[in-house]
Image (spheres, rainbow, N blue to C red):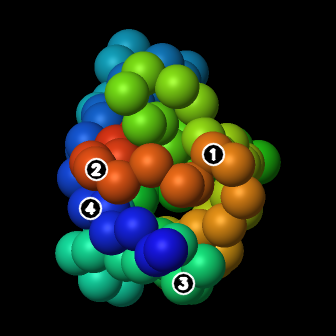
Amino acid sequence: MRLNFVLSIVIASLFVTTAAALAQSQLIFVETSEKSYEEGETIVVSGNVTSIIAGTPVTLQIFYANNLVEIAQLEIAQDGTFTHTIIAEGPLWNNEGEYTVRVT
């Protein structure tokens, strides 16, 4: 039996302190390729940052009911974009319902 679930997006802000500025706000925008998926399907999470900090990756976390399902550190391209592909399969992906994506 295949199960449906929905990913909801939590957009996080990362605050950075540098020598040039005391506090600079960096916004992260994120989206999934679809709004709902069936177990076994491919999920593509992509996004961009408003400013790039050399050597600083984006951390992606996916939760279901406060349980961590997926975690990854993603390199940011020179144009500020990032992408991560996930196959929704295995014991952590067999729950129907809402999954939360957090990116910092």
* CA gap, disc 3 and disc 2: 15 Å
Tag 4: residue type?
Answer: Val
Tell me which numbered mark, 3 or 4, is placed earlier along the sequence.
4
Tag 1: residue type?
Answer: Leu
Vertical order, 49 against 34 (above or below): above
Tell me which numbered mark, 3 or 2, is placed earlier along the sequence.
3
Q: Between residues 83 and 71, which one lies in front from this camera angle? A: 71
Q: Which residue is denoted by mark 4 in the rendering?
A: 6
Tell me which numbered mark, 3 or 1, is placed earlier along the sequence.
3
Circles 3 and 1 in contact, beta carbons < 8 Å:
no
Is residue 10 visible from the viewing direction of this image?
yes
In what element is the residue under mark 1?
helix
* CA gap, disc 4 and disc 1: 14 Å
Vertical order, 52 against 99 (above or below): below
In what element is the residue under mark 4?
strand
Circles 4 and 1 in contact, beta carbons < 8 Å:
no
Q: Which residue is denoted by mark 1 in the rendering?
A: 92
Tag 2: residue type?
Answer: Gly
Residue 13 in the image: state x and y as whole percent.
30, 34
Residue 88 in the image: state x and y as whole percent.
59, 68
* CA gap, disc 3 and disc 1: 14 Å
In what element is the residue under mark 2?
strand
Residue 68 in the image: state x and y as whole percent.
58, 31
Residue 98 in the image: state x and y as whole percent.
27, 48
Q: Is residue 57 left or right of residue 34?
A: right
Residue reaching furthest to the right: 55
Q: Is residue 88 left or right of residue 81?
A: right
